[in-house]
Amino acid sequence: MDKRMNPVSIKRVLISESVDPCCKRILQENDIQVTERHNLSNDELITQMKDFDGLVVRSATKVNADIINAAGSSLKLIGRAGTGVDNVDVNAATKKGIIVMNTPSGNTISAAELTCALIISLSRHVPQAVMSMKAGNWDRKKFMGAELFGKTLGIVGLGRIGKEVATRMQSFGMKTIGYDPITPPEVAKSWGVEPMSLEELWPQCDYITVHTPLMPSTTGLLNDATFAKCKKGVKVVNCARGGIIDEAALLRALESGQCGGAGLDVFVEEPPTDRALVNHPNVISCPHLGASTKEAQARCGQDIALQIVDMVKGKALVGAVNAQVLSSSFSPESQDWMKLGEAMGRVLRACISSTSTLDHISVTTQGECLKKSVGFLSSAAVVGLMSGGTENGINLVNALPLAEETGIIIKRAHSDVSEAGAACVVEVTVNGSVYKATGTLQAAAPVLLELNSCKFRQPVPLTGNLLFFRAAASPQLLSTVTGVLAAAGAEMDHLSASAVSDGDQWFCVGLSSPVEDLSSLMAVVKEAAQLTV
């Protein structure tokens, strides 16, 4: 019962791409072994991943499910030195309990500056004019441009990069409008961006830039239908991810004049084999240079290394895209509550037949101080309830997804009101039967207050080796159980009893050492103590 939720142990890291040297240096300075092997094929990665705890990539390495599954139980972390993780199968990693993290702010400035450069280049045809000059021409009239002053820039995606683009282009006198389903309107307004829906945004823009992740809801966000809603001659920029702008629709819009120009740093296929967009006279294209500055590469390399070190040392978890529940669990107090949640899950698991399938799990936090803790407490309780059921071991990363995948319904709730102050209540339903435990912390130690509606007279410390059973109240029980345990070579440290309920009591025996053949011991205890269950 005293299993601690230690920080993730990372001892060996593989860097599979060219990452700034500071990454390797920082990891090595913190006693993490680093191996650099670049340009590995998919098969080579599959072969080698079982030898490493962590993998650091940029954008070229495609970390698919085959690679993740081949790693077995060794791989615990995939770190992306950059923004976005679309080259990592996050779902496969989550199911294996592997943390996936990126460096959300590492290339923010570089990507924003390139976006601004493409907007300016589109307005003044700078690359085309340069190439014309190199060809020996002097075509001033051919490259008539337009001022950015007074024009409207639509920013789709108001995260870090979208914000930086907005503030920079405002200095040119551009009006900035934007859309983001997450960023609060008042926050966008504080940056000088007028928030609005996409339907409102399309027809107002002279320029549109996209800064969203690539996901089903953003794939083909600019398509034939949305281009038709825009001003004729609208110019678009994509320095985010290929596919956000439908490339076929963009080409049609360029040919018809509905789109007046495009600045593309990313493509669906990289490098693109279909050169129609790259070769179009109104397209300025770059080979995915958003993060290609010395500063961004150094920042991303440093950030991913420091994030890994902080996680290993239990200081913080930054940039985790599939383990948000862990981000708030690095304080000592949160660690104590997580130990309680897991211990309560283990207690309830012991009350249930090993062959029984869980139907519902309900976790309720009580007390105002636990208002934001129901997430990690739910994960911790599920870890305790399902321990030993997965190849890679269940942990806080994969607990809830794996439980839901097996058909278990999980309910989370919070109540500010609690008789016992701050407390956690875990209920499990199995074949119509409900098992319930209530626990809290005393002097930072997890204790059990109540089990199946039976309140313990003194809180039961949930540490060490514990044996729970229910029996009819009897004055001979203590001496009988003590004798049975002694005969089995088990020494009792303490015994806790609940109040009597329906003639029965719950008992918790603290043992000085674990018992190897617990099932046989329990059979003897049941017979000697005349247990009702």
Image: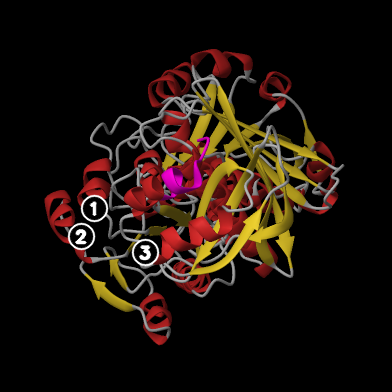
Q: Are marks 1 and 2 in contact (CB under 8 Å)?
A: yes
**Rendering quarter of residue 357:** top left
* Residue where numbered disc 1 is placed: 72
**Rendering quarter of residue 177:** top right
- Please give the name of the residue rendered at 64% of the width and 37% of the height, measured from the top-left corner: 452
* Residue where numbered disc 2 is placed: 50
Q: Is the residue 225 above or below the residue 366 in the image?
A: above
User: Badge 2: how crowded within 10 Å, few (<14), some, or many (20+)?
Assistant: some
- Please give the name of the residue rendered at 59% of the width and 38% of the height, measured from the top-left corner: 209
Instruction: Give x and y (percent) for residue 248.
Output: 38, 21
114 left or right, relative to 207: left
Circle 2: residue type: Lys
Question: In this rendering, does residue 158 appear at all?
Answer: no
Circle 3: residue type: Ala
Question: Which of the marked residues, 3 or 1, is nearer the chain's N terminus?
Answer: 1
**Separation (CA) of disc 2 from disc 3:** 45 Å
- Please give the name of the residue rendered at 69% of the width and 18% of the height, measured from the top-left corner: 199
Question: Which of the marked residues, 1 or 2, is nearer the chain's N terminus?
Answer: 2
Span highlighted in magenta in the image: 525-533
Q: Nearer the viewer, residue 450 or 488?
A: 488
Q: Nearer the viewer, residue 433 or 109?
A: 433
As drawn, the label of residue 459 is none
* Residue where numbered disc 3 is placed: 487
143 left or right, relative to 441: left
Q: Secondary structure at mark 3?
A: helix
Question: Which of the marked residues, 2 or 3, is nearer the chain's N terminus?
Answer: 2
Q: Please state the total of marks drawn on the protein image.
A: 3
Circle 1: residue type: Gly
The extreme front residue here reads: 476
